[in-house]
């Protein structure tokens, strides 16, 4: 599945999620990092090793990753050559944009896919070198998603 590189869970307790998923699935996580987008603080961690990665996000209340109803599967992440073009395509296909990091200087967008109860994240391929440097130094480049041909 070209372009797919991670699955994300939003969690209220990063330490518990790292411990429990590490034990249950035998995966190892990088050290969590603090970050902020807009007015929302969050912590983030990825599994170590090669893709597909598991991403954990521990957010402050509210914002694009609200966990007021508990932990959940949030999104599937895909690299794309153009967040704008991909977002237009997804919206035209009936998958509305729920949040865009673009106004905050982050080239990604979430689109709701109701049939799976989660979102698809498009991340600009230009961000990939920084991602690899931060989370998998020396990791191999990953291909972008190629859009499906238009439906007839």
Image: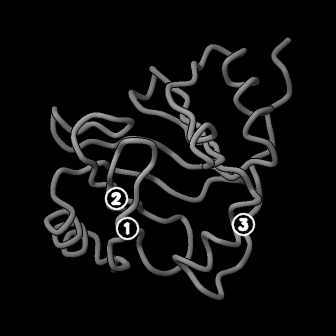
Whether residue 136 sits left or right of residue 55 in the image: it is right
Looking at the rendering, which quadrant does residue 138 occupy? bottom right
Q: Do the residues labelled 2 and 1 touch (CB within 8 Å)?
A: yes
Q: Are marks 1 and 3 in contact (CB under 8 Å)?
A: no
Tag of residue 56: 2
Residue at the spot of label 3: 142
Query: In terms of depth relative to the viewer, which is nearer, 39 or 7?
Result: 39
Q: Position of residue 63 (x, y in %)?
A: 34, 35
Say how the picture is coloured: one colour
Reading the chain from its start, which is encountered first: label 1 or label 3?
1
- Label 1 vs label 3, nearer the camera: 1
- The spot of residue 152 in percent (x, y) is 86, 11
* Residue 45 circle label: 1
Q: Is residue 14 left or right of residue 107?
A: left
* SS category of the residue bearing label 3: loop
Residue at the limit of the structure toward the front, as seen here: 39
Question: Is 15 drawn above or below residue 138 in the view shown?
Answer: above
Residue appearing at x 45%, y 20% in the figure: 114
Task: In this rendered view, identify the residue nearer to me: 124 or 117.
Answer: 124
């Amino acid at each position: 599945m070209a372009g797919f590189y991670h699955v994300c869970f939003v969690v209220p307790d990063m330490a518990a999620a790292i411990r429990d998923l590490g034990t249950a699935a035998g995966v190892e996580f990088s050290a969590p990092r603090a970050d902020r987008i807009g007015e929302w603080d969050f912590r983030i961690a990825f599994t170590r090793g090669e893709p597909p990665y598991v991403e954990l996000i521990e957010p402050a209340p509210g914002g694009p990753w609200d966990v007021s109803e508990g932990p959940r599967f949030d999104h599937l992440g895909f690299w794309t050559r153009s967040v704008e073009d991909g977002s237009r395509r997804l919206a035209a296909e009936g998958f509305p944009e729920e949040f865009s990091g673009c106004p905050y200087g982050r080239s990604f967008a979430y689109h709701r896919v109701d049939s799976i109860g989660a979102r698809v994240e498009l991340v600009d391929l230009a961000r990939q070198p920084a991602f690899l440097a931060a989370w998998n130094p020396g990791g191999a480049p990953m291909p972008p998603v190629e859009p499906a041909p238009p439906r007839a």
